[in-house]
Image: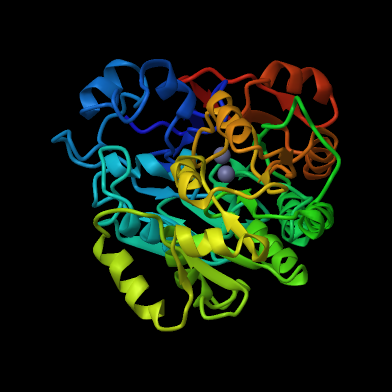
Amino acid sequence: MVKDQTTLTFYGGVNEIGGNKILLQDKDTKVFFDFGMSFTAKKKFYSPPFLSPKNEKSLQELGILPQIQGIYKFDQTSPETNAMFLSHGHLDHSAYLSFIKREIPVYCGETTQTILRSLSETRRADLEFDVGDINFNVFRTGNKIKVDNVVVEPIHVDHSIPGAYGFLIHTSNGTIVYTGDFRDHGAKPEMTQEFVEKAREVEPVAIVTEATNMTGATVSNEVEVEVKLDKISSQVDGILLAEFGYSDVDRFNTFYRIAKKNNRCLAVSLKQAYLLDALHKDMHLQVPALDDDGILIFRKSKKRYEKWETKLIERFDGEGKIFDVFEVSKQQCKMVLAVSFYDFEELNNIQPVAGSCYVLSASEPFNEEMEIDYERLVNWLSHYGLPQYHVHVSGHMMPLQLKAALRKINAKQVFPVHTENAELFKKFMGNAAGQVTLVEKSKEYPL
Ligand SMILES: [Zn+2]
Ligand SMILES: [Zn+2]
């Protein structure tokens, strides 16, 4: 039976940061917005790599992958979902595309496609991230994509990964706004402002908003981060180790500039170099080419390199651009080395000289690409005599800015997601901008 109403069902992003999986039904049209991995639910049961899910059955059994008809490639039913839209390429919004029937069209920004392709080319496909064979349909800001009864309009927003979008979703019962993840204190706040303005103009009946930062909010921005990093970089005697999101291109650019300013080179991992090389071709981003003087490529010590790694090494080897641990070790005071906690074994060969520093330039202890094992991190830093600076701004809106944006958009109903503090959010919002509904997982909400 075809219902005449429009409904929203939240299969993820409920009482957790990330894992968004939002189903919109309009009469007989079904569209999903994001289909991410839920780090919180997964962490309850698993601790990779030794305790990892073996198949989708256990993920469903444990409630990590929701029970939904006509969507998964492992069930034999015919597809019951018309399309899927990705707000951006963070894994907590995109990774579980892995399980989706390949005949369901997936829409995303061009940059998101590049990022997900690079990621799948540089890491071994596993159960929870295998998107190499997905045929993405790419969109740009302002496109209007018709999916049966529904028209979806993506509008760019600023976030800690390039190619992030919010959506205006025009349904037969009014327009719904979905913010995805967004902020207004990053490198391109004007994109978020434009999104808020467009969302206001359509007089939405409902908004699904992220509400990540209800505790531990700060007042800062990407410009201030650059000033602070510059100050640190100018005073460090030895090597400056920098931990930041692999796909956080704005932060990469910030480190690239402060390194240059202080006569250092920024050395990135092979994996990050691979992504930057792909993003450099994106005309809408300003990513320096790998052959830029300010960039080096750090080759970790290992016995066997993957094919894509060998290719990259061969391409740049003649230019003196590929550095191994020993070369890094010899030129410590000329280097900002992008590291991940998982590379810390390399410190044994680098042997940071006295006066070296470590900067955590990602959210602690959680970020949208990895979990930082904080206690162990502290032990490693202490062993090598590396003080830790935390210089970062979040990828998410701060409470007062979020309230102002929602007040401006003025939707009738507000559904907070991507937060562990929905009740706090509701109290804080009061009657400022629409009726706030605290959502329950898998429950259907009519508009
Ligand atoms: Zn997220
Ligand atoms: Zn995100």
Q: How is this picture coloured?
A: rainbow
Label tally: 0
- Comparing 280 with 365, the one in front is 365
Q: Is residue 89 left or right of residue 260?
A: left
- Comparing 19 with 368, the one in front is 368
Residue 143 seen in the current view: yes
Please, is residue 77 above or below residue 142 in the view? above
In which quadrant of the rendered image does the N terminus lie? top left
Task: Give the farthest residue toward the bottom.
Answer: 318
In which quadrant of the rendered image does the C terminus lie? top right
> Which x, y percent locates residue 42?
40, 24
> Which x, y percent locates residue 267?
55, 63
Q: Is residue 123 left or right of residue 359?
A: left
State which image quarter holds ligand 2. top right
Task: Give the farthest residue toward the left.
Answer: 76
Residue 146 figure quarter: bottom left
> Which x, y percent locates residue 46?
36, 21
Residue 109 seen in the current view: no
- Comparing 258 with 55, the one in front is 258
Q: Is residue 418 left or right of residue 401?
A: left
What residue is drawn where x is 57% and y is 27%?
379
What residue is drawn where x is 64% and y is 50%?
353
> Which x, y percent locates residue 32?
43, 41
What residue is drawn where x is 66% and y is 40%?
386
- Comparing 77 with 52, the one in front is 52
